[in-house]
Image: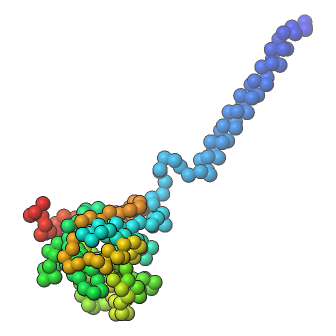
Amino acid sequence: MPPRPASFDWCRASALPVLLSTFIAVWLAGCGSAGDDSGAPSSTGSGAPPTLEDQGPIFARVETDRGVFRFVLRTDRAPVSCANFVNLVDRDFFDGLDFYRHSRVIRQVGNPYNDDALRYSPGYTITPEFAPDLRFDRGGLVAMSRLGEEPTAMVRPNEFFVTTKPQSERFTFKYPVFGEVVEGMDVVLAIEPDDTVRSIAIEGDATPLRAVHAELIEKWNASLDAARDPRDGDR
């Protein structure tokens, strides 16, 4: 058999490194892709639905005739109460309502009648949530009123009040706390009877809270839509 031309051997020898490099590059790319899928979070947003563990701090910014105060929502202690409050804020429910209940110790808002003799019903109630570390031992606590004095009474979900100073133990485990004032306590103290809530805004991302309680929120909104709001005739 005649010997192969020298040029043939050179061509094969020079092409081999190129083919080998291409193979290694393709193999490494495949390994890197597999590693990304197994170790890094997806950037498409798909995956497990959010939970309350994903919920970061959220605040309510309350603008009143006397100025602004802010309170942190204690989603870690009263998640249903906080979800209810956020939903009402989303609906602008509190905008334009008066602090119709005013005393040395509380500032209360949430009754569209703005009259203690007439009470509005949103068509639903919620179960009171209590936490041992949320006691009325300091001012600036944000809590909800209930439908009665008995231990089993449900929460009136459309009303909340802010305390101005520590209260007796009779308040603790009677009125469920869901927030704490973190800024503007002087504004709370300055609020006069019938001063108005101009607006409330939620600060922070409340998406996990809304997602976790989506079914409840849907039911609450159906009840609110069906309830008679005395402001409807003025809108």
- Quick one: which residue is furthest to the top in this view? 2
The image shows residue 90, relative to residue 163, as above or below, that is above
| The C terminus, quarter of image | bottom left
The image shows residue 25, relative to residue 86, as above or below, that is above
Residue 176 falls in image quadrant: bottom left
User: At which x and y percent is residue 72?
Assistant: 40, 71
The image shows residue 18, relative to residue 45, as above or below, that is above
At 63% across and 44% down in the image, what residue appears?
34
Residue 40 appears in the figure:
yes
Q: Nearer the viewer, residue 233 or 52?
A: 233
| The N terminus, quarter of image | top right
Q: Nearer the viewer, residue 224 or 201?
A: 201
Residue 87 appears in the figure:
no
At 38% across and 75% down in the image, what residue appears?
181
At 45% across and 60% down in the image, what residue appears?
50
Residue 142 falls in image quadrant: bottom left
User: At which x and y percent is residue 109?
Assistant: 24, 75
The image shows residue 42, relative to residue 95, as above or below, that is above
Q: Viewed as shown, does residue 26 lie left or right of 205?
A: right
Q: Viewed as shown, does residue 192 lie left or right of 82?
A: left
User: At which x and y percent is residue 30?
Assistant: 65, 38
Q: Nearer the viewer, residue 235 or 128?
A: 235
At 34% across and 70% down in the image, what residue appears?
69
